[in-house]
Amino acid sequence: MQQRVVITYAKYGDTSVESSILEEAGFEVVLASEYAEADRPALWQSADALMVGIDVWDRETIGTLGSCKVICRVGTGVDAIDIPAAEDHGIWVTNVPDYSIDEVSSHAIALMMAQARYLFPHRNLGRSGNWRYRAETPIRRLSDQTLGVIGLGRIGKASARKGRGLGLRVIAYDPYIPDSDFDSVGAEKVDFDTLMRESDYITLHVPLYDGTRKLIDARALSLMKPTAFLVNTARGEVVDVPALVEAVKNGVLAGAALDVLPVEPPDPDDPVLHDDRIIVTPHIGWASEEAGHDSRVRASEDIRRVLSGERPKYPLNEPKVRVW
Ligand code: NAD
C-alpha cells in the first residue's frame, strides 16, 4: 500500500518542493490544511510520516498516531514535540539543524545593529525632516563594546564570528561545550552572571527546554548595564517577557529586540508590542529563499529515507520499538 506523508504547515506556503521529492519516491502527499479540523484526528491516524512546523505534538496527540514512523520538524527548534513520547511509540523525530545558521545569526546581528545605531528612532527623525543630533541618545562606538553570546552552538558561533568581524569583544556562556569551541570563534568563556554584567549586547542562542525556560528572568535582567540591549532569536519562552517589558520601562536595560515571543502571534494589546525601545520581528530569523528551499529538500529526503527503511540523516532520538 502507498505510504502517506501528511504536511501540517501547508497554510504557510507552497509545498511543491516536498511533493516533487516525495511523490517521485512513490509516496502520497496530503496537506492537512485541506481537511476540516474535525477530520484531522483521522488524518493523523492514517499518516506514515508527518512533516510539521511549530505545531504542538505532545504525548497525548502522539498517542493517537497509527502507523506513523517519523515526525519531521521542517526547521530547527523541536521544543513543541515530545521526543521521549515519540521514542516510546517507536517514532523517529528528525529536524533540519543546518538550514538557517547564516540567516538567524545575521538576523541577530541586524537586530543588535538596529539598537546600537538607534535605527528606527533615527528613521522616524529622517522621515520628519528633523536633522538634529539627538544628544540624549547615547550612541556608542561598536568596537569599544562587548557582545555576550548565550548558547555557543551552530547559530551562536556564527553570531560570535560576525560580532568579531564588527570589531566587538565577544564573551560567551555555554556550559556544555569544550574550551576549544570558544577559541575557534575568538570568544572568551565566562560564567552566566559575568556575561549579564559585562555585555553591551546579549544575544540568545539556546534551545528551549526546562533548563532554559525563563533563563532571562527579572534577576538576570537586573544584572544588565542600563545601557545594554537584549536580542532574542532563540525561543520566546527563554525570556520572562513581562519582566523584560517592566525592566525596559524602569531603565534596568536600554531595550530589546525579539524575533520570538512566548505566544506567536502575540495579542495585539501585548505591552511588548507597544514600547519603542523594544523591536519585535515576526519569527523570520530563519527566512531566506535559500533557507526555505534547503529545509524542505533536507526534510523531504529524511522522510524518504525513513519510509524506505533507512536511518534518517538528522535523528533526534532512537525509537524503542520499530512499528514497521
Ligand atoms: P545548537 O544545538 O547548535 O546550539 C545550542 C547551544 O546551546 C549548544 O551549544 C548548547 O550547549 C547550548 N546550551 C544548551 N543549554 C544551555 C544553557 N542552559 N545555557 C547556555 N548554553 C546552553 O542550536 P542552534 O542551531 O544554534 O539553534 C539554537 C536555537 O535557535 C534553536 O534551538 C531554535 O530554537 C532557534 N532557532 C530560531 C530560528 C528563528 O527563525 N528565529 C531559526 C532556527 C533556530
Image (cartoon, rainbow, N blue to C red):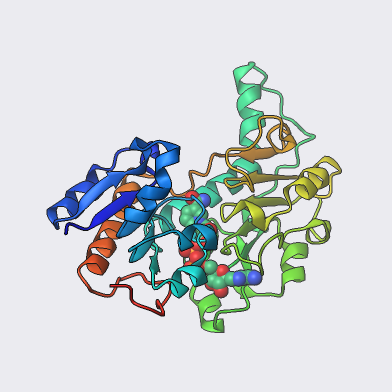
Compared with 258, 85 (above or below) is below
- For residue 74, which quarter of the picture? bottom left
- Examine the rendering and report whether any part of residue 39 can be seen: yes
Residue visible at 23% across and 42% down?
A: 16
- Residue lying farthest right? 250
- Examine the rendering and report whether any part of residue 105 can be seen: no
Find residue 250 and report its horizontal and vertical position in percent: 86, 43
- For residue 36, which quarter of the picture? top left
Quadrant location of the C terminus? Answer: bottom left
Residue in the foreground of this view, choosing between 200 and 101:
101
Residue in the foreground of this view, choosing between 309 and 275:
309
Residue visible at 38% across and 49% down?
A: 42
Compared with 195, 280 (above or below) is above
Q: Is residue 229 left or right of residue 206?
A: right
Find residue 283 and report its horizontal and vertical position in percent: 52, 44
Quadrant location of the N terminus? Answer: bottom left
Residue visible at 35% across and 64% down?
A: 70
Q: Is residue 161 left or right of residue 118?
A: left
Q: Quadrant of ligand 1?
A: bottom right
Residue in the foreground of this view, choosing between 283 and 288:
283
Q: Is residue 87 left or right of residue 310?
A: right
Find residue 22 and report its horizontal and vertical position in percent: 20, 54
- For residue 25, which quarter of the picture? bottom left
Find residue 271 and report its horizontal and vertical position in percent: 74, 35
Residue visible at 60% across and 19% down?
A: 127
Compared with 26, 272 (above or below) is above
Residue in the foreground of this view, choosing between 24 and 173:
24
Q: Is residue 300 left or right of residue 272?
A: left
